[in-house]
Image: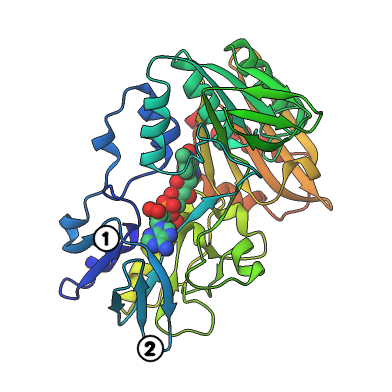
Amino acid sequence: MAAVKSFRSRDTVSTIMMLSDQSDMPVRKPPLSKQLWKGMAVSDCFYNPARFGVEYHPATRVTEADFDRHLLTLSSGEKVRYEQLLIATGLQPRRLPGDCAEAVYFNSLADFRRVRQKLAAGGSAVVIGGGLLGVELASSLSANGIRVKLVISSEAPLTGYLSEPLAVRIRARLQAAGIECITGRRAIRLEPGGRVQLSDGKQLDADVVIPVIGQQPSVDFVSHDPEVSRHGLAVDARLRIKGLEDVFACGDVARFGVQASSFRHEENALRSGAAAGRNLAGDDVQFKPSSFLYSEFLDMRLESIGVGNAAEMKAIGEDWSDSKEQGICILTEDDLVRRVSMVNYRMDSETAEMLSSRLIGRSAEADQLQIVRTVLKPAA
Ligand SMILES: Cc1cc2nc3c(=O)[nH]c(=O)nc-3n(C[C@H](O)[C@H](O)[C@H](O)COP(=O)(O)OP(=O)(O)OC[C@H]3O[C@@H](n4cnc5c(N)ncnc54)[C@H](O)[C@@H]3O)c2cc1C
């Protein structure tokens, strides 16, 4: 939708056809694990393609792309011809071995509805994965009176984004909210009856099981190359797929650099979409990816800039205020700042960009924590 909007600001006459395998209107995904559980109306997270003169085709899955002939094949067998193509198919959840009727691989509005319906009369849930999505869903379900067990493979959640002491504080907050954190173990298999086998031989049972153990680009209609399936479609600075003149990609499915997964967030999806839309309309916009991400769980907010896995980095600056429950950590690798994460601060995207250019990739210095504190002060 970001691409459609910026394309239309340049070109009001060309036909835009939008194909989606979802039966709903296009939806903003972040509310699915947060605000929708706090009473936000489903209609408030829809985008409206008709506003931009888009021919929207829901429940239409693309199964094959023939770039030479400019043809897409749909699951119905129908063919669609295009002049220019934008691929924005996002990510799909990684799956665990085994299956059960209680499992929901949470990624869409339909999944939100399924979980809500299964737990309408209360009950229990096992959420598998201590990343952003796992923590958000565990918090939202628990706040709705569901008994939640959260399976975390490390000792604390969010260790990909936070230094250990900050991650341990988040674990304590989740536990205080009534979420049972099962740490240091992996879920290895799903079995009928909502049963989850753990790596230590134990098992958990629940009314709903939500595995959120990672995601991978939805590219099977383009390529089965394991490199592409893992990292996405490599694009150049103008968001063209390398080697193709008239095919662009944006958002989570695109690969902007080596650390592909560090750019799979809403801010980068919106910005890359906006740039791709202008380039489709004939502009020449160079895109620089944004690593800025945010997450909300319980009454807390996490924001982060930078790339890479915090669990493999060294924290060189760390701050935590118990009274305000605010924290900052600066994480380095090979003496270079790679990631800066904040708990209960709020930046706008310009501040995030400015902070990124001042800190990310720079040598670690003693005054960097002070820089972050100063920059964030007015926003805190
Ligand atoms: C539950 C949830 C919560 C999130 N919360 C946050 C957050 O708090 N902060 C944040 O920064 N980011 C968050 N994200 C990530 C953010 O939503 C994504 O970065 C963003 O949606 C990416 O946009 P996109 O357009 O690239 O892909 P998507 O929004 O995933 O859209 C891709 C669309 O393409 C469709 N599609 C896929 N394959 C095909 C096909 N072959 N044919 C037709 N259609 C197809 C998909 O069904 C989907 O509708 C969250 C994601 C989820 C799932």
| Image-based side of 164 in relation to 264, left or right | right
| Residue at image location 29% in from the left, 74% down from the top | 78
| Residue at image location 67% in from the left, 39% down from the top | 161
Alpha carbons under labels 1 and 2: distance apart: 27 Å
| Image-based side of 109 in relation to 170, left or right | left
Q: Indicate the amino acid at tag 2.
A: Arg
- Residue 12 visible in the current orientation: yes
Question: In the image shown, does 98 or 334 lie closer to the viewer?
Answer: 98
Where is residue 34 shown, x and y percent of the image? 43, 30
Q: Which residue is mark 2?
A: 69
Q: Residues within 10 Å of mark 1 (few under 14, many from 20)?
A: some
Q: How many marks?
A: 2
Q: Secondary structure at mark 2?
A: loop
Could you say which disc has been placed on residue 5 in the image?
1
Classify residue 245 by image quadrant. bottom left
Q: Residues within 10 Å of mark 2 (few under 14, many from 20)?
A: few
Question: In the image shown, does 266 or 84 lie closer to the viewer?
Answer: 84
| Image-based side of 186 in relation to 244, left or right | right
Could you say which disc has been placed on residue 36 in the image?
none
Q: Secondary structure at mark 1?
A: helix
Dots 1 and 2: beta carbons under 8 Å?
A: no
Where is residue 30 shown, x and y percent of the image? 43, 39
For the view shown, which residue lies furthest in the front direction? 192
Quadrant where the N terminus sits is bottom left
Question: In the image shown, does 214 or 255 lie closer to the viewer?
Answer: 214
194 vs 84: above or below:
above
| Residue at image location 48% in from the left, 22% down from the top | 141
Question: In the image shown, does 267 or 361 lie closer to the viewer?
Answer: 267
**Foreground mark, 1 or 2?**
2
Classify residue 184 by image quadrant. top right
